Image (cartoon, helix red, strand yellow):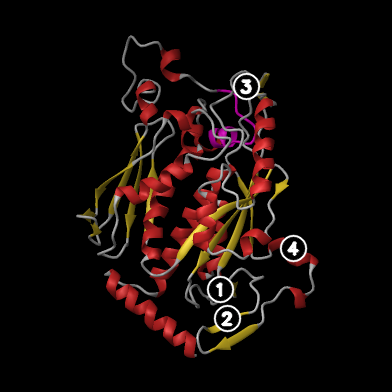
Amino acid sequence: MRYLTAGESHGPQLTAIIEGLPAQLHITAEMINKDLKRRQGGHGRGRRMQIETDTVDITSGVRHGKTLGSPIALVVTNDDWKHWTHVMGIEPLVEGLNPEDVKRQITRPRPGHADLVGGMKYGHTDLRNVLERSSARETTVRVAVGAVAKQLLSELGISIVSHVTEIGGVKADVKKSESLSVSQIREIVEADPVYCVDQEASKLMVKAIDEAKENGDSIGGVVEVIVEGMPAGVGSYVHYDRKLDAKLAMAVMSINAFKGVEVGMGFEMARKPGSQVHDEIVWDQDQGYTRTTNRLGGLEGGMSTGMPIVIRGVMKPIPTLYKPLQSVDISTKEPFKASIERSDSCAVPAASVVAEHVVAWEIANAILEKFHSDQMPQLVDSINQHRAYTKEF
């Protein structure tokens, strides 16, 4: 299974094509739109979220609510495109238009963005050619793709949720989420302004975001994704590029502004002896093999253990600041304050939604690699047989 995305931040639309989904998977635009709305929410979002109301059009690969087995095309229209038709037009410039008005050239790279190095790499002296694609706006359509993957997983008894564990140095009490199921966590976070399970920490996070906004600054944080219902043995230890934890880490690190990933206890393992890190194995008639703890986050040797998969990512503060940092104009080489584009003071809640969906895609892809099926009923049967096998192994 694979997908490609295309589109610029202020272009006419964002597009994704998914290839390799089994036939007879139930999919509707309404299912996807619910997750697109979640991505646009969360305290700290900027003005762009008031301009765009993201909804998806499914333009191929689905008939009467079910996948056909052929490629699926998803389109999210950029409502703001009408204000950028000259600036971001695809056709050559028309004579008579003011070149400066049309181009809105950017020659002052923003620290922390792809602007300068992207311009060097592709030879763009107008850095808008870089920032339009490197923008986190592209994650909109990645959430749409992940929503499709989540629907596949739900039909296989696999559920997934994300939540915020830290913003601006304010940490949630992890014990408040450890005892909750995926459905319980989702119920709480969907009613919370920063998608946090810990209500007291949530209030402090909101305060920290507001203070950052007042100061013209931005703050980052940590998000966690939990996957329940995974069968054991998905992924492999036999080669580096087949390890499931490696694929999940790559997916989370691919999200804009993410700079670190950990699984289970993560970096805390460096401060613990082995007896307080590894998960002891038990077996009973009802559940089969389980672990007494889940410190390794449901992954051993690059494979799922059957325990919940737990993965976290750290998002740096957004580098587009309303008190811009020092930069250099690439056309004059003179020092200047970096250009300001519309931005958020904190996008960690939204980033948790993105993380949930990129993880969902990797999990779904790994499932289909192990249990390849052209039809959903065949896939369901294969996984049920595998679960019975591993239980009695």
> Is the Cβ of the residue at disc 1 closer than 8 Å to that at disc 2?
yes
Distance between mark 2 and mark 3 Cα atoms = 58 Å
In the image, which residues are magenta?
A: 107-119
Distance between mark 4 and mark 3 Cα atoms = 42 Å
Q: Considering the numbered disc 4 on the image, is that residue within a helix, a strand or a loop?
A: helix
Q: Considering the numbered disc 3 on the image, is that residue within a helix, a strand or a loop?
A: loop
Choose the circle earlier in sequence order: 4 or 2.
Answer: 4
Distance between mark 1 and mark 2 Cα atoms = 7 Å
Q: Which residue is mark 2?
A: 290
Depth order, front residue of 323/238 = 323
Q: Is residue 201 magenta?
A: no
Q: Which residue is mark 3?
A: 329
Disc 2 residue type? Thr
Q: Considering the numbered disc 1 on the image, is that residue within a helix, a strand or a loop?
A: loop
| Residue ID at (32%, 48%) | 30
Disc 1 residue type? Met
